[in-house]
Amino acid sequence: MGDTSGSNPAKQDFSHLNADMLHTILELVSDGIWDWNANTGFVYRNPGWYEMLGYPRHALENTLFTWENIIHPEDYPQVMALFDDYINRRAPHYQTEYRCRKKDGSYLWIEDRGYVIARNPDGSVARMVGAHRDIQARKYSVAQLEQRNQSLEALVAERTRELARVNQQLKLQLDENRALAERDALTLVANRYRLEKTLLQACERAQRFRLPLALIAMDIDDFKPINDRYGHGAGDQTLVRVVECLESCIRPCDLLARWGGDEFMVILPESTLETAKTLAEQICRKIRTIQAPGDFAVTLSLGVAERHADESPAALMERADQALYRAKAAGKAGVSE
């Protein structure tokens, strides 16, 4: 079944149902039903959806981020590719199977179907509804049937399990090595590699869901004289204390990264220029309160930028960096956009 926002009269009428009435009806449905208003970003999920994943009713935020956050990382790229193909009319329907993380941390196999029921005049999605259905039992039954049909002897099966355990250990080690490779050794925040990777993903998400995205670039004012006068040990302590201050100001969904030397950047998903500027001014004030490892004051200069439509990560970073230079030129210890 494909996009229903065109010729089918029954579906066309459905798209005009009062949202409160529709959601009241969906409260009675046992399957996990979702209703996405793409123009506002609001996502309704009925009680069946929460119960399927072990959450109290309506316990999570009514945003797309809630859905993205529970998809298994290995399934996420394929799910997003199918979703993009459908909403952009490159595919006749949206239906897929993937794993969702439950409240207890385990994963549940679900079948996801969705239908666009209304589009805006420019062809973009205005409203889309769908359902998540628990298929864990079916997946388990298929696995059990395959296991019964196998003719491998017990020794081979044990060897397979042993290899799986070794593989899990290797995977854990690989994950740990990957985490170390994406972390700044001194401050323990994200490094430049992770910053660029995360910013690319954030730009793709902002483009896909038509959400705002902002970036703050900053560096410590007159950092070189601190190193020259007090030594690199004091400089390192200053960097660590600055990072602790920055982490206390940002949200869990934001990413703080060390860009290089005494330069840092913060990625702010779903944030406008005004939101980013307000946060930058808060950071600018709070940084003055940190206890420096010497008789000197620590200040930051900050530049903020909000992503434009179709703008690349490199272009966004360049604009934030230019705003930072303007803050420096204006006398430091301030914010520029």
Image (cartoon, helix red, strand yellow):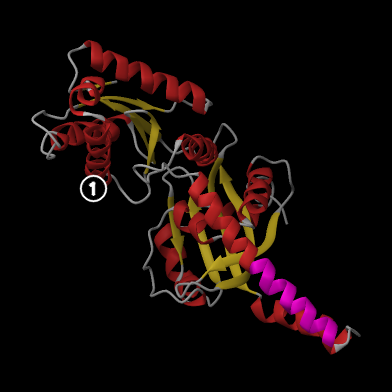
Image coords of residue 117 (percent x, y) = 59, 51
Q: For the point 50% across and 34% down, which residue is it?
A: 196
- Looking at the image, which is closer to me, 100 or 61? 100
Q: In the rendered view of the protein, which quadrant contains the C terminus?
A: top left
**Does residue 55 show up magenta in the picture?**
no
Question: Which amino acid, by three-letter code, is at mark 1?
Answer: Ser
- Looking at the image, which is closer to me, 298 or 305? 298
Q: Where on the picture, by quarter, is residue 265?
A: top left
Q: Is residue 102 left or right of residue 151?
A: left
**Does residue 166 show up magenta in the picture?**
yes
Q: Where on the picture, by quarter, is residue 270?
A: top left
Image coords of residue 213 (percent x, y) = 41, 35
Q: Is residue 225 left or right of residue 82?
A: left
Q: Is residue 104 left or right of residue 95?
A: left
Magenta part of the chain: 155-168
Kindly report the secondary structure that dominates the magenta region of the rendered protein. helix
* Residue denoted by label 1: 248
Image coords of residue 113 (percent x, y) = 64, 61
- Looking at the image, which is closer to me, 131 or 212? 212
- Asked whether residue 14 appears in the rendered view, the answer is no
Q: For the point 25% across and 36% down, which residue is it?
A: 233
